[in-house]
């Protein structure tokens, strides 16, 4: 496979390297993801994160393992191990379903390589289409609020929700972006703030609990988030805290948009209740860790509830911005996602 580099993935000399998103923004470290165990560990630890990027990294690794001589049976086992590494993010499942079809080809090495590179290029195109469709919804002088991280760090392209914000800013329509910290792992504070700063987009970092007061003071014109899975009825699983923003936006009469590629749509999942929600380690809540080290602030052995995602009901969403265009609540109620 030829050398390839996105914001967070690098293929060099037939090996996969990932940008450690746990060390950002203080450090930009490229880590080896040469084996299934290495990549699965990076995914579990969120050194690789973002639903599209997780799927792409797994696909690229499978192709590289094939090129480096791993037999078909072991590739099949590797595929299933990677499939289980992040149960909520459906992009991973959809990408690996395509890689599994390639795995059955006569020339498995070429088939896997072609399919993995096709997925990367498709993601870049999907992101751009989402950005174009979404930016048309952003009004002049908008003050937008976003949650978690949905930019180039999480995709192969310009991103999903941040891709929309980026294109809208380039069109002169974004005055400010409110960036949720996004507890407990602070992807907003560490990653989104960094990305927006690199792009020159004005932003202000806020604690998650400050969003309500900003909305009450009419300082938020729209909320833009990504998605890890969209059910057939339009319910959306996304980073924990998304549902709270949707409820607040609904109460204050603020548009709430979800930006995601069609690979995030799960037509086999009837509704949000059927989406598996990953439970993560208690240590993410009892303290904080990063390039600076680790600190614990909670009592030893504190009982912890730590779901990685929550589900936002379709009735709270103003529009689903996909690479195919904007889907309205009326279209979702008419079953458009069920027919795809």
Image (cartoon, helix red, strand yellow):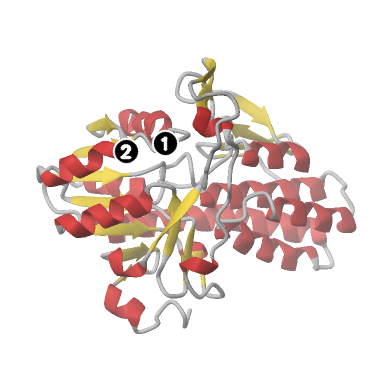
Q: Is residue 11 visible?
A: no
How far apart are the two marked residues, 1 and 2, measured between alpha carbons? Answer: 7 Å
Q: Where residue 291 sits: x, y (%)? A: 53, 18
Horizontal side of 134 relative to 275 (left or right) equals left
**Residue 37's x, y, as percent?**
77, 40
Q: Residue at x 48, y 21 (%)?
A: 297
- Which residue does the image show at 45% across and 24% down from the upper left? 25
Residue furthest out toward the top: 292
Q: Earlier in the sequence, mark 1 or mark 2?
A: 1
Considering depth in this image, is 97 or 225 the residue closer to the camera?
225
> Does the residue at mark 1 contact the one at mark 2 (Cβ under 8 Å)?
yes
Residue 338 lies, in percent from the top left, at 47, 80
Pick whichever, 318 or 25, lies toward us.
Answer: 318
Q: Residue at x 17, y 40 (%)?
A: 213
Task: State the SS at label 2.
Answer: helix
Q: Position of residue 12 (x, y in %)?
A: 68, 34
Element on which disc 1 rests: loop
Say above or below: 129 vs 187. below
Per the rendering, the mark at residue 183 is 1
Q: Is residue 40 left or right of residue 201?
A: right
Q: Nearer the viewer, residue 206 or 204?
A: 206
Residue at which label 2 appears:
208
Instruction: Quadrant for residue 196, please give it.
Output: top left
Callout count: 2
The answer to whether any part of residue 86 appears in the image is: yes
Q: Is residue 334 above or below residue 169?
A: below
């Amino acid at each position: 496979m030829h050398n390839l580099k996105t914001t967070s993935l690098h293929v060099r000399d037939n090996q996969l390297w990932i940008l450690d998103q746990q060390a950002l923004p203080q450090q930009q470290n490229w880590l080896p993801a040469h084996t299934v165990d290495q990549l699965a560990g990076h995914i579990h630890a969120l050194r690789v994160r973002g639903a599209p990027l997780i799927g792409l990294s797994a696909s690229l690794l499978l192709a590289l393992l094939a090129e480096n001589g791993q037999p078909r049976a072991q590739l099949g086992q590797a595929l299933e191990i990677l499939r289980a590494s992040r149960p909520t993010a459906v992009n991973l499942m959809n990408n690996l379903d395509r890689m599994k079809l390639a795995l059955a080809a006569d020339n498995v090495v070429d088939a896997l390589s072609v399919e993995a590179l096709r997925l990367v290029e498709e993601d870049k195109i999907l992101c751009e289409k989402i950005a174009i469709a979404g930016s048309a919804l952003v009004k002049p002088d908008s003050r937008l609020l976003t949650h978690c991280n949905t930019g180039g760090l999480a995709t192969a392209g310009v991103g999903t929700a941040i891709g929309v914000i980026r294109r809208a800013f380039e069109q002169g329509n974004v005055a400010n972006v409110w960036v949720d910290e996004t507890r407990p792992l602070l992807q907003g504070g560490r990653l989104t703030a960094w990305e927006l700063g690199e792009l020159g987009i004005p932003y202000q970092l806020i604690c998650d609990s400050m969003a309500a007061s900003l909305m009450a003071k009419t300082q938020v014109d729209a909320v833009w988030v990504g998605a890890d899975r969209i059910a057939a009825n339009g319910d959306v699983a996304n980073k924990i805290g998304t549902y709270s923003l949707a409820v607040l936006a609904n109460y204050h009469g603020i548009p709430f948009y979800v930006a995601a590629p069609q690979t995030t749509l799960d037509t086999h999942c009837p509704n949000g209740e059927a989406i598996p929600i990953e439970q993560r380690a208690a240590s993410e809540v009892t303290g904080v860790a990063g390039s600076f080290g680790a600190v614990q602030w909670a009592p030893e052995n504190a009982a912890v509830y730590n779901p990685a995602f929550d589900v936002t009901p379709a009735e709270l969403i103003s529009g689903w911005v996909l690479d195919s265009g904007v889907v309205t609540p009326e279209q979702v109620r008419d079953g458009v996602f069920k027919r795809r």
